[in-house]
Image (cartoon, rainbow, N blue to C red):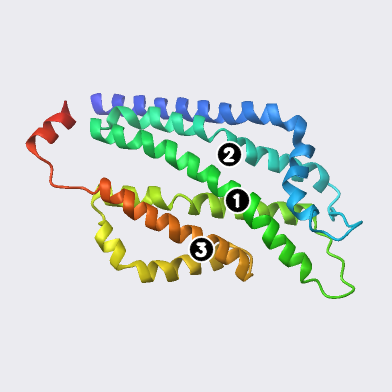
């Protein structure tokens, strides 16, 4: 009976945390939805800056001018509310963690948030201007580039997620080293395979052009090296009796 009550309490706590996370996203959305068209213009600016003169984006669907900015605002609201969402995650899992685990998780949550934002910023300010200039410059003679706003939004969101998640590589490496799944030395020995792997991932996660692929693969490689360095600090070692007592205390 006690176990059943404990399970119910955990489920209730999980529900409450999820509701708070959703409410934080909704609150951001309500603040941003009025500026939905302006936000879409900012998103489209890297492409608009390289389009030929007197060329604009188009909407091939009657509902696209409404739903594309709406969808962007909803996704952006989640991005902005990530710190609040992670705080709710932390509030749910923290009671079951040891002291040393709490000391590790807090910096990881903060770092993962900053790295995710850094990945999105890198895509917007570095990758988009270069990649879009390349695409529009490769148009054959007599072909006018006129991108549909929904297709453009889908492409951009895909790149945002690809770069945001890829920039989490150091966090994943630190967690693997800390948990004992691998060691920094083992990762260094696999460096050649990692380099090939990041370029393969760059090919799979980005449009089929060498520029976007390289601009994703190189940061992933650099972040891998950073993760290996930081992972060396958190590598799991054999626990001492004092450490175990401290964890349980």
Q: Answer left or right for 100 relative to 27.
A: left
x, y percent for residue 222: 44, 58
Q: Residue at x 59, y 35 (%)?
A: 80
Q: Are marks 3 and 1 in contact (CB under 8 Å)?
A: no
Task: Residue under label 2, please give it.
Answer: 79
Q: Residue furthest bottom?
A: 141
> Mark 2 and mark 1: span between their CA atoms?
10 Å
Could you tell me if the residues under marks 2 and 1 are in contact, i.e. CB atoms within 8 Å?
yes
Where 73 sits versus 221, above or below? above
Callout 3–callout 2 Cβ contact below 8 Å: no
Badge 3 element: helix
Q: Please tell me whether mark 1 sits on a helix, a strand or a loop.
A: helix
> Circle 3 sits on which residue?
217
Which label was assigned to residue 122? none
User: Residue at left 63%, top 54%?
Assistant: 126
N-terminal-most mark, 3 or 2: 2
Q: Name which residue lies at 9% across and 39% down.
A: 240
């Amino acid at each position: 009976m006690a176990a059943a009550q404990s399970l119910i309490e955990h489920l209730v706590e999980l529900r409450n945390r999820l509701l708070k996370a959703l409410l934080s996203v909704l609150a951001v959305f309500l603040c941003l939805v009025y500026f939905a068209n302006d936000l879409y213009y900012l998103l489209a600016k890297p492409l608009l800056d390289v389009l030929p003169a007197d060329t604009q984006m188009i909407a091939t669907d009657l509902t696209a001018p409404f739903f594309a900015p709406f969808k962007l605002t909803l996704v952006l609201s989640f991005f902005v509310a990530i710190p609040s969402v992670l705080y709710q995650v932390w509030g749910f899992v923290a009671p079951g963690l040891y002291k040393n685990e709490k000391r590790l998780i807090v910096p990881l949550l903060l770092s993962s948030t900053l790295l995710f934002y850094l990945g999105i910023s890198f895509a917007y300010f570095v990758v988009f201007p270069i990649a879009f200039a390349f695409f529009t410059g490769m148009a054959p003679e007599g072909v006018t580039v006129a991108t549909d706003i929904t297709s453009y939004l889908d492409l951009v969101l895909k790149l945002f997620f690809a770069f945001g998640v890829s920039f989490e590589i150091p966090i994943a490496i630190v967690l693997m080293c800390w948990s004992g799944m691998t060691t920094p030395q083992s990762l260094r020995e696999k460096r050649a395979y990692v380099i090939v792997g990041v370029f393969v991932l760059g090919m799979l996660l980005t449009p089929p052009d060498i520029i976007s692929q390289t601009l994703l693969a190189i940061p992933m490689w650099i972040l891998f090296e950073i993760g290996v360095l930081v992972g060396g600090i958190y590598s799991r070692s054999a626990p001492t009796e004092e450490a175990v007592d401290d964890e349980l205390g």
